[in-house]
Image (cartoon, rainbow, N blue to C red):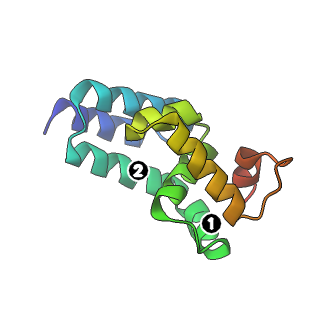
């Protein structure tokens, strides 16, 4: 197994003890250093899903029109990642993440006065 995979396994074991945002940032750094290998991404997604499973289930049940990408972005926003960090993680433009945020807000019937991250954190 590659060094990145071993680091991801160590980080997965520490999820209960560390700040989740810090852990996600460490995963991002590992993936950027080692390159986006499919296995590394699979581990990252499985760990994110494990950490956020109750949230994802609640989100999908309450807002079934959300796309897979919107659900992933909502999960990362809930975890405390910024729009810029999400754009870097997915290797997409910040504007694309902003468009997804807008779409999530629209599908959740949120007005512009309400904070999206707070709403997501209070959902589960």
- For the N terminus, the quadrant is top left
Q: How many marks?
A: 2
Q: Nearer the viewer, residue 79 or 104?
A: 104
Q: Is residue 108 left or right of residue 28?
A: right
Q: Secondary structure at mark 1?
A: helix
Residue 4 point in image, percent of width and height: 24, 32
Which residue is label 2 attached to? 47
Residue 119 at least partly seen: yes
Residue 114 point in image, percent of width and height: 83, 49
Please give the name of the residue rendered at 15% of the width and 35% of the height, measured from the top-left corner: 2
Residue 74 point in image, percent of width and height: 58, 52
Residue 59 is labelled as: 1
Q: Is residue 117 left or right of residue 28?
A: right
- For the C terminus, the quadrant is bottom right
Residue 111 point in image, percent of width and height: 83, 55
Please give the name of the residue rendered at 59% of the width and 42% of the height, measured from the top-left corner: 98
Please give the name of the residue rendered at 67% of the width and 65% of the height, measured from the top-left corner: 107
Please give the name of the residue rendered at 39% of the width and 42% of the height, measured from the top-left corner: 12
Do tag 1 and tag 2 residues touch (Cβ < 8 Å)? no
Mark found first going from the N terminus, 1 or 2 = 2
Q: Secondary structure at mark 2?
A: helix
Residue 19 at least partly seen: no
Above or below — where is 57 with respect to 12? Answer: below
Within the image, what quadrant is residue 29 found in? top left
Residue 78 is labelled as: none
> Comparing marks 1 and 2, which lies closer to the viewer?
1
Q: Nearer the viewer, residue 91 or 4?
A: 91
């Amino acid at each position: 197994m590659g060094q990145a995979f071993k680091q991801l396994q160590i980080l997965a074991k520490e999820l209960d003890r560390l700040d989740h945002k810090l852990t996600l940032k460490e995963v991002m750094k590992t993936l950027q250093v080692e390159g986006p290998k499919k296995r590394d991404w699979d581990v990252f997604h499985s760990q994110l899903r494990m950490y956020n499973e109750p949230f994802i289930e609640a989100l999908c049940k309450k807002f079934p029109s959300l796309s897979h990408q919107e659900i992933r972005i909502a999960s990362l926003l809930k975890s405390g990642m910024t729009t810029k960090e999400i754009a870097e993680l997915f290797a997409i433009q910040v504007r694309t993440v902003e468009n997804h945020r807008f779409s999530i807000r629209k599908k959740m019937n949120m007005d512009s006065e309400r904070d999206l991250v707070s709403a997501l954190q209070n959902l589960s």
